[in-house]
Image: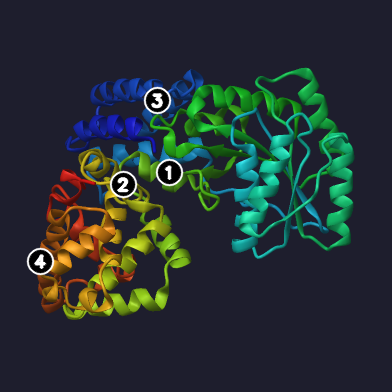
């Protein structure tokens, strides 16, 4: 996410971070590069002008923090301005209302509105602990009604049976009555999208807004459309009393223009950011965390929160203790860590949140991927419990059986066993030195995974050579 902008800004700011003092000359030179980086990231021109003007004013007009060098202070100014541009802080979802509180989602066709409706419902159910009902009023595209119903079934959320022969307004009224009758706390209304903003679309969504009286009216927009996302959001904001924006497909947006433009142009906060196709891939938008990721500082806080929500605490503690003692960490434990990693969004999802994650991702993109780790999991799963607990007993005939069961070559089994042996040695050294405590508290026992990563991030080689079928 935001790789292009992150790499460009990191290189630019590195040049000034070591400067002994901030001058108008070196600030102007740096801001020229920052301006180019933002424009290349498809940030709207008015936003770029405002951003660079404010950074220059702050850099030349304030005293330097005594704990920072002048160059570091400039980087902090850029960070603070990024945060301010994107909205200063997370704007919480407002569902405090006489049930049902209604959330109305609007946006263009293809922006990910229906998927976002399901993601939002799951977020409210799991994190806000409220009952939710979904309803689609997209009578122009019956497949959208079926899609929302299917997604609702997958995540265990109630969905209202919309009649595609009825009007959107009638469906919305019926859904509200049903939600009220069943004491549903939150009703999410997925409206129809169009290929472009048109008068009929706006009139319809205005009528729906009048009928539903939503506590939240959110515009769903595709991050990959860059500054066009901000311009379209403004068109909706002019027609509707929007309360916020949901930025979708941000995991595929290497530029970041939408995230930096939407808040400034519309005046409406980005409340959520979608980072994948899975229904769990929706997160509250925290400007300070996104700014940190853009500047290559990572987002460890979000990573820790995700660990707390998605990992098995008892199992993680048990494995962490094994690593700490430097003994007893088995291939069974290692497979458990692969499963936990998958819950966290895979390798990419974790590296993206670590400091200089973008650089690590660039270095590793051809050497490591979730497919290669799935093969590792398959190899371990093909072993017997006894073999997982004691890999030393795995000789020639056993390797042949394991390779056949996993659909890989014997060389791949050998490579895993050799690297696992090396990893155990490293863990024993860590255990003796007692240096794992702080990292274990943060990563909940998953850091053993790092030693299996290829090419400069661990012991090397496993994912880079690939598996042969």
In the rendered image, the vertical position of residue 241 relative to residue 397, given as above or below: above
Q: Earlier in the sequence, mark 4 or mark 2?
A: 2
Q: Which residue is mark 1?
A: 290
| C-beta proximity under 8 Å, tags 1 and 2 | no
Q: CA distance from mark 3 to mark 1?
A: 15 Å
| Residue 362: percent from left, percent from top | 24, 38
Q: CA distance from mark 2 to mark 3?
A: 19 Å
Q: Which mark is residue 41?
A: 3
**Tag in front: 4 or 2:** 4
Question: In the picture, which quadrant includes the N terminus?
Answer: top left
Q: Residues within 10 Å of mark 4 (few under 14, many from 20)?
A: few
Judging from the image, what secondary structure is the residue with disc 3 in? loop
Q: Which mark is residue 396?
A: 4
Left or right relative to 376: residue 302: right
Q: Which mark is residue 179?
A: none
Q: Earlier in the sequence, mark 3 or mark 4?
A: 3
Q: CA distance from mark 1 to mark 2?
A: 10 Å
Q: CA distance from mark 3 to mark 4?
A: 54 Å
Q: Earlier in the sequence, mark 1 or mark 4?
A: 1
At x 32% / y 51%, what residue is drawn?
A: 347
Q: Earlier in the sequence, mark 3 or mark 1?
A: 3
Q: Residues within 10 Å of mark 2 (few under 14, many from 20)?
A: some
Q: Which residue is mark 2?
A: 297
> Is residue 323 in sight in this rendering?
no
């Amino acid at each position: 996410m935001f790789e292009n902008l992150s790499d460009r800004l990191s290189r630019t700011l590195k040049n000034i971070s070591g400067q002994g003092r901030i001058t108008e000359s070196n600030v102007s030179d740096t801001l020229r590069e920052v301006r180019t980086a933002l424009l290349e990231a498809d940030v709207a021109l008015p936003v770029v002008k405002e951003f660079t003007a404010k950074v220059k004013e702050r850099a030349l007009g304030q005293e330097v923090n005594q704990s920072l060098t002048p160059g570091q202070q400039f980087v902090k100014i850029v960070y603070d301005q990024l945060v301010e541009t994107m909205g200063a802080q997370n704007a919480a979802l407002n569902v405090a209302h006489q049930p049902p509180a209604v959330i109305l989602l609007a946006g263009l066709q293809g922006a990910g509105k229906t998927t976002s409706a399901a993601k939002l419902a799951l977020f409210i159910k799991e994190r806000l602990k409220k009952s939710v009902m979904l309803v689609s009023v997209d009578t122009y595209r019956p497949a959208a009604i079926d899609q929302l119903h299917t997604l609702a079934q997958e995540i265990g959320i109630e969905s209202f049976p919309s009649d595609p022969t009825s009007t959107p307004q009638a469906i919305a009224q019926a859904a509200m009555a049903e939600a009220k009758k069943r004491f549903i706390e939150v009703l999410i209304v997925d409206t129809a999208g169009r290929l472009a903003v048109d008068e009929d679309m706006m009139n319809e969504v205005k009528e729906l807004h009048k009928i539903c009286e939503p506590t939240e009216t959110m515009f769903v927009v595709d991050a990959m459309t860059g500054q066009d996302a901000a311009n379209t959001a403004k068109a909706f904001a002019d027609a509707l009393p929007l309360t916020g924006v949901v930025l979708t497909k941000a995991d595929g947006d290497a530029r970041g223009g939408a995230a930096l433009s939407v808040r400034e142009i519309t005046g409406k906060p980005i409340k959520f950011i979608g980072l994948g196709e899975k229904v769990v891939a929706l997160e509250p938008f925290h400007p300070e965390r996104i700014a940190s990721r853009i500047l290559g500082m990572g987002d460890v806080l979000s990573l820790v929160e995700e660990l707390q929500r998605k990992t098995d605490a008892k199992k993680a503690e048990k494995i962490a203790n094994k690593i700490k003692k430097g003994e007893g960490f088995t291939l069974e434990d290692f497979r458990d860590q692969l499963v936990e990693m998958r819950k966290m969004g895979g390798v990419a999802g974790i590296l993206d949140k670590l400091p200089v994650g973008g650089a690590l991702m660039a270095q590793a993109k051809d050497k490591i991927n979730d497919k290669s780790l799935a093969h590792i999991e398959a190899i371990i799963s093909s072993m017997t419990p006894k073999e997982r607990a004691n890999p030393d007993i795995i000789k020639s005939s056993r390797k042949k059986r394991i390779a056949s069961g996993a659909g890989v070559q014997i060389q791949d089994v050998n490579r895993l066993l050799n690297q696992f042996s090396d990893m155990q040695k490293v863990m024993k050294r860590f255990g003796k030195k007692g240096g794992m405590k702080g990292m274990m508290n943060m990563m909940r026992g998953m850091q053993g995974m790092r030693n299996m990563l290829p090419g400069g991030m661990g012991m090397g080689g496993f994912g880079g050579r690939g598996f042969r079928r």
